[in-house]
Amino acid sequence: MSQEAEASLEIIQSRGGPAEIEVAFVLGTGLGNMADTVENPVVIPYADLPGFPKLTVSGHDANLVVGRLEDTNVAFMQGRSHYYERGDSRAMATPLETLALMGVHSLILTASAGSVNSSFYPGAMMLVTDHINFNGLNPLIGVASDGGFVSLTGAYDPRLAKRLKRAVLRAGVTLHEGVYMWFAGPSFETPAEIKMARMLGADAVGMSIVPEVILARRLGLRTTAIAMLTNFGAGFQHGDPSHAQTRETAAQGAIALKRLLRAFLRTKEEAWVVSSQ
Ligand code: HPA
């Protein structure tokens, strides 16, 4: 682990957060207020944590919130750094290393995305089951020798997916499933690119998730991702995305996502009790 991650860990512990964190969430555009439900929250601005990103995009707070939720020690990252902010696909490396040092065993990434599946309407959520990385970028490029050969088979953890699907029933929300294709951004895709994404088998397109999943897999974190579908992709079903629309629709969808994430934490406990009988 990097010295920055070790230093961030010390700062978090010195501010009185739980010694160990079980589940961590990364909250995307318009979804930051999900952390409001944390009990006894310890809120630490990213600016106080070495190696944590300086955010440049509106719709993202920039705090790490740690505390208890549904009898679980949790961490919420309110906002992320994207590749397009500085051309750095390792922008989330130190925060993810810090979460790993805190003992996190399950990482849930959330992000807004454009739908390229005609059955997946804006406002709905999609569990990411796999991704397509077609832009030549990889956060492990240049990373020490053999350490970069990380397997991405099962990168979107099947056990976490199963638990989330059980939580869907409790929460009474809809969760589609599909493939997420990463575009570097920050410009939105062209209609021709959206057509290509559909032809290649994508169900949603977006500008995050993928580098974080790759980094998290290298750290051995079990990871899953939920895309909040905020619009149809450019030129598809009259889609013409904008940042304002993304923020607004994500904020509306945050209510369902919040219900789902709380149900997810409760479902874990019940599953644990059942399996130990
Ligand atoms: N494309 C890429 N990223 C996105 C989109 C989109 O249409 N909507 C929300 N994030």
Image (spheres, rainbow, N blue to C red):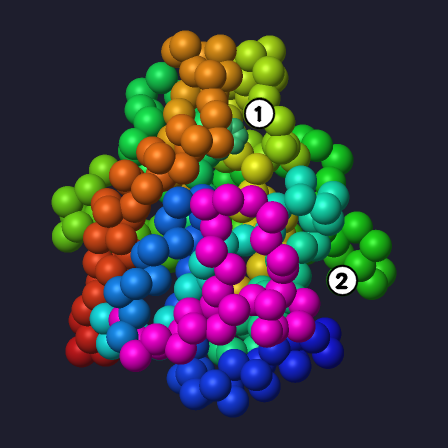
The secondary element bearing badge 2 is classed as helix
User: Residue 88's x, y, as percent?
Assistant: 73, 49
Task: Tell me the magenta residue range.
Answer: 40-69
Q: Three-letter amino acid code at disc 2?
A: Gly
Q: Quadrant of the N terminus?
A: bottom right
Few, some or many C-alpha atoms within 10 Å of disc 2 (few <14, some 14-19, many ≥20)? few
Residue at 48 percent of width and 86 percent of height: 15
Camera-side residue of 169 and 51: 51
Q: Which residue is mark 1?
A: 188
Residue at 53 percent of width and 64 percent of height: 221
Instruction: Answer with the quarter of the image where residue 177 lies.
Output: top left
Residue at 63 percent of width and 59 percent of height: 53
Residue 260 visible to the viewer: no
Q: Is residue 64 magenta?
A: yes
User: Residue 20's x, y, as percent?
Assistant: 44, 83
Q: Which residue is mark 2?
A: 147
Determine whether, in the image, residue 192 is placed left or right of residue 161.
right
User: Residue 105's x, y, as percent?
Assistant: 46, 70
Question: Is the residue marked 2 within 8 Å of ligand 1, measured from its CB?
Answer: no
Question: Is the residue marked 1 within 8 Å of ligand 1, measured from its CB?
Answer: yes
Residue at 59 percent of width and 53 percent of height: 55
